[in-house]
Image (tube, helix red, strand yellow):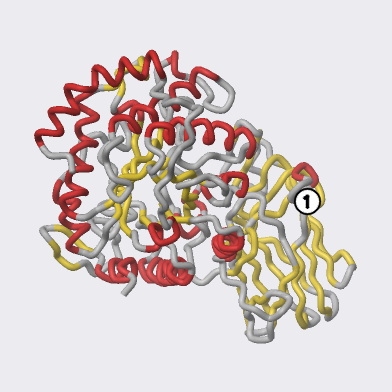
Amino acid sequence: MINRRSAIFIWVSRIFLLAALTFSGCEHNSDKPLVFTPIDLHDFSQIHKGFNLLGKYDVGWSNNGYQEEEFIILKDLGFNFARLPLDYRTYTLTGNWDIFLEEEISKIDQALAWGQQYGVHICINIHRAPGYCVNPGTVPSNQELDLWTDREAQEAFIKHWAYFAEHYKDISYRDLSFNLLNEPKNMDENTYAEVMQRTIDRIQRINPDRIIFVDGLNYSRQIIPSLKNNKNIIQALHVYDPMTLTHYKASWVEASDTWPLPVWPMADIPVYLYGPWQADYQSSLVLEGNFSKDTKLTINVQQVSNKSTIKIRLDGSEIFSKVFICTSDPGEDWTKILITQWGYQNISGKDYSVVLPSGGTRLTISNTEGDWLSFNRLTFSYGDEETVIIPGNTSWGAKQRTCRLTSEGKVTDEDGNPLVALGSIIANLELARQQNIPVMIQEFGVYNKTPHDVTIGYLKDVVSVFKSKNIGYAMWNMIGSMGIINSKRADCNYEQYRGKSLDRGMTTILQGN
């Protein structure tokens, strides 16, 4: 435990630590084989649940350190895990990421001490790293480097983890773990794995028993089999699908204010229809069922990248075609013009309909030209009857497939199993089980603009998946717009708790009761 005496020792020894980092890289004898303490990583994941604490999340607006009350609340409500996402700019000298600020590091030390005092495991995560962050931000001009291509950024990244590894070398793995990097984007797995492996090797030469979390690719959505044979590595997944539900009207997500009001459950159908420009993902949505003559089929288009063409076929015959071309002119199709680094990616939000000229059993919806488009819903209207399908798979690259629409208006797979929009996380966790890869969910949650009843229904189903797979989880965040406390939801009946507003319904779900 970091008490006052050991804190003084740590402070005095940091000068020597920095010198060691500079001249030796903190490497032990690489020829000497590492000795690992046997740790049940699956059990470690299963027994931990908690939250992300944002005391050093961003140098500009979230850099006040941590409060003892946060850890008191965690213990009081039955949680035992806190992930600390860090912005490297909060603990290094402005303009020089090689100089660590002692007074800022001490705030992390204090969080660890409180964690030990209140039985809360601490996981340090570099959220904004030298050379990479999933969020945009301003960095000094000499730090506008790319972690994946610039050796200087890679060495700085590894040096930061070497610093933390040496600084906390004597802290038990039961009290402290590391999460290397938050949410790598779509990138080459070999490049990502190589940088992570070099960082793992450096840490383990200092302390082989430190448990290290490695985020999955595609914004921490998918398992990385190439890293599965490492000792003391747990892969970290984030669950924010359907994103149109979890991030509805989130100010930091462009055009999220144009999304339809979320509902739950949604169907496990991808929201994207890819054209030939996305040849690796191009696929058609096929719906099988008994479709009556004069049924009106309406597709509500959300967004189009550059250009696309929707074609709908009934039993092989084309019954609808619509060309979309994105320009600066709103014309009849666009409600919002978006110019991006990939060109125009305009918002529509409009309905496009076709009346079936005959009965049939197979509808095929394709994007036959251009880049990609997304859609909000499919509506089948026949007389006074209406069936609405809300696609809920917001994962980039997810391919369309063949589904069935039952006479009751339910969407199933070809075997008749219900298609609820949690298929991606279930598939990832099943892959992890098959390959014996330890996993933990280190981020999930719902922004406060989504209706509370929808949020509760979604979280209940998500947490039930986690529990059924025997894995731990940490919500983003505890106090704030996605958390259980002071979330400022307009439609939530809060309970007063320690002078704060507690969402008891959400809390009970997360407690696993």
| Number of on-image labels | 1
Direction from residue 217 to residue 462 in the image, left or right: left
Q: Is residue 170 visible?
A: yes
Residue drawn at x 54%, y 47% as measured from the top left: 216
Q: Is residue 507 shown above or below 193?
A: below
Q: Nearer the viewer, residue 394 or 353?
A: 394
**Please, what secondary structure does the residue beneath circle 1 have?**
strand
Q: Which residue is mark 1?
A: 309
Residue drawn at x 48%, y 19% as measured from the top left: 144
Q: Position of residue 458 (x, y in %)?
A: 44, 68
Q: Nearer the viewer, residue 243 or 354?
A: 243
Res. 79 image quadrant: bottom left
Name the residue at the right extreme: 317
Residue drawn at x 64%, y 61% as measured from the top left: 300
Give the quadrant of the N terminus: top left
Residue drawn at x 24%, y 30% as measured from the top left: 105
Identity of the amino acid at label 1?
A: Thr
Q: Is residue 376 visible?
A: no
Give the quadrant of the C terminus: bottom left
Name the residue at the front extreme: 32
Q: Is residue 137 shown above or below 76?
A: above
Q: Position of residue 223 (x, y in %)?
A: 57, 51
Q: Nearer the viewer, residue 36 or 314?
A: 36
Res. 404 image quadrant: bottom right
Q: Position of residue 197 (x, y in %)?
A: 54, 35
Direction from residue 285 to residue 123 in the image, left or right: left
